[in-house]
Image: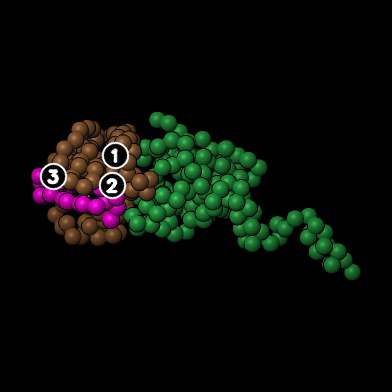
Chain colours: A green, B brown
Amino acid sequence: MERVPVLKIGDILLVSIQIDMEDQVALQLQEDLAERIVATGCHGVIIDISALDIVDSFVGRTLATIASVSRVLDAETVVVGMRPAVAITLVELGLSLPGIRTALNVELGIEMLARARQESNPDLDDDEDEADAAAVSTP
Amino acid sequence: MSGESQRLPVSTDQDVVRVRQLVRTLSVAVKLSLVDQTKLVTAASELARNTLVYGGGGEVVVARVQNERRAGIRIVFADQGPGIADLELALTDGYTTGGGLGLGLSGARRLVDEFEIDTEPGKGTTITVTKWCR
Ligand SMILES: Nc1ncnc2c1ncn2[C@@H]1O[C@H](COP(=O)(O)OP(=O)(O)O)[C@@H](O)[C@H]1O
Ligand SMILES: [Mg+2]
């Protein structure tokens, strides 16, 4: 059985689905990602589906499950690169992918993850702000 | 109404992938629009998976069809499984007996131009869908 590779890039796990996945391959990806999130402590997952020419209800459900499982493991998931024809078809199929963040491409996905991380965890602001806070609290 | 047809068995996950690929190839050949290709391949994926998971396997026949005005693709999904006792219920969005999303049958029906089901409890299920070029 083929396997979809999971790459670690900084604090992000990047998955680029390049094959027409059998259902078992999609389920394996779901497991692999959960394990990699725990093993790496990454807080963001980007799933690039720009090579997929369809997303049916099985793959749609798998993406939704990956997003939910990631969230429980303190990681946000962004699905990027959905083709326009795929988006039109998904909506007509009746699948609006609730609970899934989407962005147009990997770059925007990375920005979205950075913003989400900032909002959910203002303490993790960059060094400058921490210095400011320290300065303020100094009598 | 004529044209070549191709038959594929559906007894593994991999066969479902092959069905998607064959439907894609023939959809391109009859020049369905990109969105219509995507809709038909997605519908085929849903129905072939049902043939495998609920029908216990079966076969799919994909054919080019032609009427006076247009070309199209017709796909028949056939199994000798348990059949569907309550068709109206099975065609309801969200109804599933297998822990799915319950969007395969109802969604596939929305994605094609013609959709016919012939099913009988204990005998099996045959679903025929057609998508026409616009
Ligand atoms: N070929 C089939 N043979 C028997 N039952 C079927 C078949 N296809 C669909 N069904 C029934 O219809 C229900 C709805 O199917 P579907 O809309 O594809 O949703 P899902 O696959 O998520 O369960 C299935 O859960 C099953 O009970
Ligand atoms: Mg189904």
Secondary element under disc 2, as helix, strand or loop, is loop
The residue located at (60%, 55%) in the rendering is: A112
State which tag comes first along the sequence, 3 or 2. 3
Q: Are marks 3 and 1 on the same chain?
A: yes
Q: Position of residue A66 (x, y in %)?
A: 47, 49
Left/right placement of residue B19 relative to residue B127 reads right
* Most foreground residue, B70 or A132: B70
Quadrant in which the N terminus of chain B appears:
top left
Residue annotated with mark 3: B124
Q: Which residue is labeled 1 in the image?
A: B30
Q: What's the residue at 52%, 48% (across, down)? A: A80
- Chain identifier of the residue bearing label 1 in the image: B
Q: Is residue A31 visible?
A: no
Contact between labelled residues 2 and 1, with CB atoms less than 8 Å apart: yes
Badge 3 and badge 2 both on one subunit: yes
Circle 2 packing at 10 Å, graded few (<14), some (14-19), many (20+), is some
Magenta residues span B110-134
Q: Is mark 1 within 8 Å of ligand 2?
A: no
Say what amino acid the circle numbered 2 marks.
Cys
Please state the horizontal and vertical placement of residue A61, each as a whole percent of the image: 39, 51
> Which mark lies nearer to you, 3 or 1?
1
Q: Which chain hosts label 3? A: B
Residue farthest top in this picture: A1
Please give the residue where the numbered disc 2 appears in the rendered image: B133
